Amino acid sequence: MSYTTVIFDMDGTLLNTLDDITDSVNAILTKHDLPVRTIDEVRHMVGNGAVYLMERAVLGGKLNPDFDRILEEYKIYYEEHCNIKTGPYTHIPELLKELKERGYRLAIVSNKPMGAVEELNKIYFGEYVDVAIGVTDSMRRKPYPDECIAAMEKLGSTKEETVYVGDSEVDHMTAMNSSLKCISCLWGFRTKDELVAAGAGENAFVTDPMEILDILENS
């Protein structure tokens, strides 16, 4: 069976969100007189959602007595500042346009809060992507398969006809747990060496979004 459906991660795959995430993290850390983080530190903290990000970013992690308040302040601040420096990676809009014109069904699944996912999808990809799913209380976050399963159900697609595209070890595990073929992109938050070390060596690797078309059309 040929592929009809593509599920994309958002951060590090479709959108370069790292500057806005870093700025939001540091705004809250500064507010609480905590040490700030470099952009490279934050790059290696993202992927598992806001709780894990702030657990790594906050001095003392969850043992910090103010952690819960800091986490909630970060979520609110980021949702209000999630599109200051954020933008699509080179050739992403062209890829999505071409995929849509060729009849592919497209979805986004992300460990970002649902509100931010819906807002950013509406701004950048709304004419191409019909289903965008972020973190809610009703399903487990990646790398559990819940979000991918929900996306496939909404699109009317099966796992056999669906491919997953992401940039991190979390995305690799998400694809595995969802029984999906994974394409790992190398313009995001992880290097190929980091992905291979995490067990993703058998994935297809791409350095430009348009290469995804060739993989889909020749599979």
Image: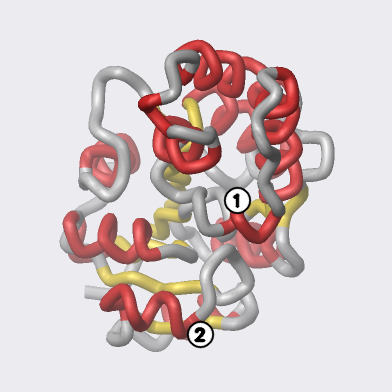
120 with respect to 49 (left or right): right
Percent across and percent down for residue 99 are 55, 63
Q: Amino acid at mark 1?
A: Val
Q: Is residue 87 above or below residue 123?
A: below
Q: Quadrant of the N terminus?
A: bottom left
Image point 54% across, 44% down: which residue?
Answer: 129
Q: CA distance from mark 2 to mark 1?
A: 32 Å
Percent across and percent down for residue 139 are 24, 28
Image point 16% across, 62% down: which residue?
Answer: 179
Q: Amino acid at mark 2?
A: Asp
Q: Is residue 69 above or below residue 4?
A: above
Q: Is residue 213 above or below residue 99?
A: below
Mark 2 or mark 1, which is nearer to you? 1
Counting the numbered discs, the total is 2
Any part of residue 213 in sight: no
Percent across and percent down for residue 142 are 31, 45
Q: Nearer the viewer, residue 34 or 74?
A: 34
Which secondary structure, mark 2? helix
Q: Are marks 2 and 1 in contact (CB under 8 Å)?
A: no
Q: Quadrant of the C terminus?
A: bottom left
**Label disc, if present, on residue 42 of the rendered structure:** 1
Q: Which residue is mark 2?
A: 214
82 with respect to 140 (left or right): right
Q: Nearer the viewer, residue 102 or 117?
A: 117
Q: Earlier in the sequence, mark 2 or mark 1?
A: 1
Any part of residue 78 in sight: yes
